[in-house]
Image: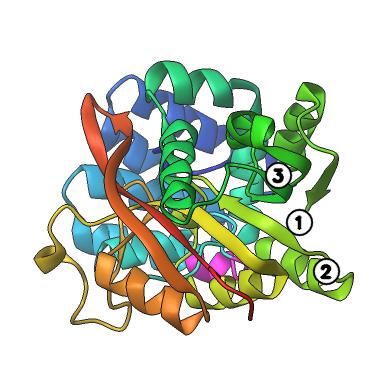
Amino acid sequence: MAETGPLFASSGDLIADRRYNAAMDLAARGDLAGATDVLAQTVAAAPGFAAAWFALGALRGRLGDRQGAVAAFTEASRADPDDYHVARLQLARLGAGEPAPAISESYLRRLFDQYAARYDAALTEQLYYRGPAILCDVVKSVLHSLGRPMRFEALLDLGCGTGLAGAAFRPFAAHRVGVDLSPAMVARAQAKDLYHRLVVGNLANVLAAEVARDAQYDLVLAADVFVYVNDLAPVFAEVARVLRPGGILAFTVETHANETDASENHDGAGVKLLPTLRFAHGEKYLREAVAAGGLKLLALEIAAIRTEKAAPVSGLVVVAGFTEQR
């Protein structure tokens, strides 16, 4: 998913909102310069209008005005301390901020709530998403090599979305729990009757709650979820706490097309923010993060999980866990 434009939030000023909408209409018709002028007038009159600052930064960037884009995104960030519009990510993309800042929960929740109704069609029909099927095949291969059947007593699906991965693994898991940050996505999953329990919440809080209730899982899934997480080691550590002996974690990520081009000389070593505002994780980074989380790497395979702009997206399928009693 490559939705990088502003997610509108009212300024509270009707006139400023109308100017913003007029600018967006101009931009939609291809008049980027005109739209930029209107937005500049809008933020001059309403300096705390974060969505307008963000849109101004985006348009200046499209016009090749990097300095102007950085200035606008900086103002958007000041007006939006919770990073509702992810201006910090845009600054990072322009090389004007920390290289791989965390994505705000409010942005992700709102983005996927808005996207839920068309999520399945967009992924399967437009992006040719095949992550769950590929993930299922790799898990089968790992279990076969360990002499174990493709059968799980309990499955935890992190970032379950509408249940695409849950559907792929349903025949192999007796009890299924799904977790997602977006209430609208969870509602879509609920309608499919794929899970015995569904939880709305972020990964850290839900995993902590599962630890507190002594829940244990044979399989933890994260299909196309960690592309929104900049630091995976803490997540892996929490996953390790809910895995049964012999349990496994299986996930997909996007990766760097060329490891030498990754941000390995920066603070976010091995993690690269993409123009889509998703994160790509390098193979070296993943190996280190899995080990830091207390897990053993069982498989790491290159795969094209989906297609974007008619080109395959470079990805990795990873399986890690405990192969023996702890």
Q: Which residue is mark 2?
A: 209
Q: Residues within 10 Å of mark 2 (few under 14, many from 20)?
A: few
| In magenta stretch: residue 269 | no
C-alpha distance separating marks 3 and 2: 18 Å
| Quarter of the N terminus within the rendering | top left
Can I make out residue 225 in this image? yes
Residue depicted at x 77% and y 64%: 216
Q: Position of residue 38 (x, y in %)?
A: 40, 39
Q: Earlier in the sequence, mark 2 or mark 1?
A: 1
Q: Position of residue 64 (x, y in %)?
A: 16, 49
Please name the amino acid that badge 1 sits on: Gly
Element type where label 3 sits in the image: loop
Compared to residue 145, the image places residue 171 above or below, namely above
Q: Which residue is mark 1?
A: 201
Please name the amino acid that badge 3 sits on: Ser
CB atoms at circles 2 and 1 under 8 Å apart? yes
Residue depicted at x 15% and y 64%: 259
Please name the amino acid that badge 2 sits on: Ala
Can I make out residue 97 in this image? no
Looking at the image, how many numbered discs can be counted on the residues?
3
Q: Which one is closest to the eye, mark 3 or mark 2?
A: 2
Residue depicted at x 53% and y 54%: 85
State which quadrant residue 115 falls in: top right
Q: Earlier in the sequence, mark 1 or mark 3?
A: 3
Residue projecting furthest to the right: 213
Q: Which residue is mark 3?
A: 182
**Which span is picked out in magenta?**
77-82
| Quarter of the C terminus within the rendering | bottom right
